Image (cartoon, grey):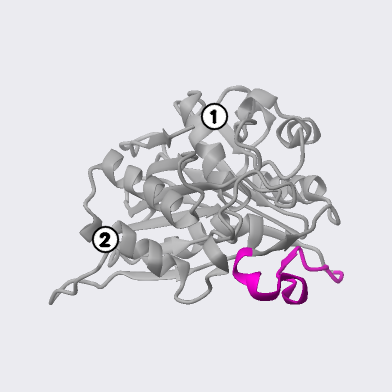
Amino acid sequence: MSTAIVAAAVCTDADTASYFELATRAGRSCLEQAGVSPDRIGLVINAGVFRDFNISEPAVAALIQKRLEVGLEYATGRVPAFSFDLMNGGTGVVHALMAARCFLAPGEVEYAIVVAGDTHPSLERDREDFPYAATGAALLLRSDGAAGGFGPPHTVERMDSVPPSAWVNLEAAGTGGRNAISVSGGFGDPLGAAERVVRECLAEEGIDSGDFATGAAVLLAPAPIPGFRERLAYRLGVPSAAVAGVDPAVGDPYSAAPIHAYVSARSSGLLDEARTVVFLGVDDSSAACLAYRPQPLTTSGTAVEMHANHLGG
């Protein structure tokens, strides 16, 4: 069985800075758009990194699962819902898609939901010492033989020693450690890493600049540095119009960036004719991408309908 994207949503509501709430709202929007009840979800994966009050236990995925009312009761003969955190910086969503595919392929799990997003642990917005936007995002996936599904992943990581990009300075924070986080960056080359990993993916998938020019292929670009979308398009030699990015008004949604770009592409009509959508995640130390084919690999068959929704502003 292949994996299909059924719905996608992002939430940037200004009335809360809680990642738990923002991700839950995005997840609920996915369920509403697809007309899927929570009891049909068999898997919840959280790819978000920075969370409310630096909570580490229980898993954030379990807390969001509870808010979504997924698998709260066990019933004989029904596969129980499973949830877990899969945190890998800016590439977490790509790796979560890979993991979800493994659960959906056998057909025992009908639907899976991937959530991502970040917030400062103090729940204070627009802090100068925190570079990421407070957002939540979600992708609803299902096992479906009528979709082309996801291709193999392509990854690249720095092989040298990488300094920590985020930590809690307990000595400086004192008793306020739950509300503190230190974030540094700028020590890598996200643009170079992205170019390398995307070229590898396009070569294996047999995609060239002509596919982007005709709208048959779309690249989803995150926003780790200013002008990333345009600069990556130039390096790859593809039309910038075929590269969907993050709304500049949002800022950098970090772990949720691939979903933001997907929703942006859908809203602008880029996905209407696309036969291949390339998901890309990147940060200072790594990059990962994979190709998604919403339609069958052949020209026959029924395409899987995709939905996308944006909450708040």
At a point 66% along the width and 64% down the height, the residue shown is: 180
Tag nearer the camera, 2 or 1: 2
Task: Identify which amino acid the numbered label 2 is placed on.
Answer: Glu
> Is residue 228 found left or right of 46 in the rendered image?
right
Residue 167 belongs to the span the image colors magenta: yes
Residue 63 position within the rendered picture, expressed as x and y whole percent measured from the top left:
39, 66
Marking on residue 216: 1
Residue tagged 2: 69
Viewer-proximal residue among 126 and 75: 126
Q: Helix or strand or loop: what does disc 2 sit on? A: loop
> In the image, which residues are magenta?
160-179
Tags 2 and 1 touching, CB below 8 Å: no
The quadrant where residue 48 appears: bottom right
Quarter occupied by the N terminus: bottom left
Residue 252 belongs to the span the image colors magenta: no
Q: Residue furthest front?
A: 175
